Amino acid sequence: MNPSQKTPLKIGMIGLGTVGQGTYKLIQRLPQLEVVAVAVQNLEKERGIDDLDTSLLTLDAHAVAVHPDIDILIEVAGGVEGTKELLEAAIQAGKHVVTANKALIAQHGTELFALAKKHDVSLLFEAAVAGGVPIVTPLKMGLASNQIEEIAGILNGTTNYILTRMMQDGWTYEDALDKAKALGYAEADPSSDVEGFDAAYKIAILAGLATGHWVNVKDMTVEGITPITPREVDYAKQFGYTIRLVALARLKNERPDVRVHPMLVPNEHPLSSVHNEYNAIWVRGDAVGDAMFSGKGAGELPTASSVMGDVLAIVADLEAGNAKTAVGMVLDLKEPAVLQPIGETTNRYYIRMTTADEPGVLAALGTAFGNAGVSLESFLQLPNPQNNPHTSLMVVTHIAQESSVQEALSAIRSLASTQAVDCVLRVL
């Protein structure tokens, strides 16, 4: 088939929410494609599409998945249970599948890829990782000759918007979250975003692409941004850092170090300049060196753009007479990766403590860190209001093992002079 032919390639869609609407709009620009069925949850809902053919809408998602006329199924509804069965049915019926579903790919990708390979169809998922930022195809194609050593990403637009507003405008977490909801960046229940799991699914996929081994999110350390306060944001600035929710995969060792948590990002690092709903992925390869991919990580048209990139990759192969796409078929993941335990990872650390403001406190803290083998890089004590018996102390360590830092903190908490260890953040 080619674009001049009268018979266009037939498209089925599951989901017509924000991303689905954007995808539908982009499909209307392309005469070689035709939407023939769309599964939705509510036939009466108003859609932001002027030329929507409502006769295409149905409540029967399974009927769309196995529709005899469709060539490509686009899944932009989300969810795992139920959605997995729909994609399995489509693959078994010989349909190529494009999905934006990161949770589904992260949890069941291995099974779905094997099924797609068995039935000689493509399963593509560019939009599942970073919205409108193309990263899956570059990792599997453009950087295929590299040994990927490290990936660090800002992979969630909701949390990045919240932290940007806290950093730039001094907003509280609660105020920034409310604004993110009002702008449509955050769901009514934002827990998957703010607790780090959305980013965890995405970095698990990227680590799997880079290593060829499936990464189980349940084996990862995942921490969210809810503990971040305006005070921590202000102190980070004083040390020359920006706070970001970072999805990290260090892949040089036999046991990959894959995790998600807030980090202090040095202001000179490219990730520190990624603001609002934007996403970015910084990749280090042994041949290419450092590479950066960035763009809008959420929204109707940016994510739809990635969906359509996958669709058109399949179209191009079908036009060339190929039954499958190269990207879709090379993802043959091996047994699960054995991840490095968090206690064995190495980082620099920012630590804020409230202690008694009296002689000997600094010496006791230095002894606790020293006994655990943790070396200090910098130190800051805030001016103490008159007659206040306590003071805030902040330290940044040199690179140290997580278990050693936790050993030092345990000793510090037991000191009579310590009122609290208020905040511990790792430094990128």
Image (tube, grey):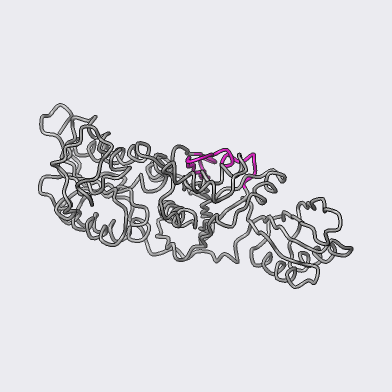
Q: Nearer the viewer, residue 261 or 291?
A: 261
- Image point (66%, 45%), residue name: 241
- Image point (60%, 52%), residue name: 263
Q: Is residue 29 above or below residue 133?
A: above
Q: Is residue 171 above or below residue 194?
A: above
Determine if the magenta segment contains residue 51.
no
Residue 138 in sight: no
Q: Is residue 386 left or right of residue 73?
A: right
| Residue at the farthest right position | 359
Quadrant location, the N terminus = top left
Q: Nearer the viewer, residue 101 or 15?
A: 15
Residue 112 in sight: yes
Residue 306, image x and y in percent? Answer: 34, 40
Quadrant in which residue 167 is drawn: top right
- Image point (15%, 26%), residue name: 4
Residue 66, image x and y in percent? Answer: 14, 53
Which span is picked out in magenta?
A: 265-292
Determine if the magenta segment contains residue 274.
yes
- Image point (12%, 49%), residue name: 67
Residue 423, image x and y in percent? Answer: 66, 59
Q: Nearer the viewer, residue 64 or 116?
A: 64
Q: Is residue 303 left or right of residue 28?
A: right
Residue 213, image x and y in percent? Answer: 41, 59
| Residue at the farthest top position | 4
Q: How many marks?
A: 0
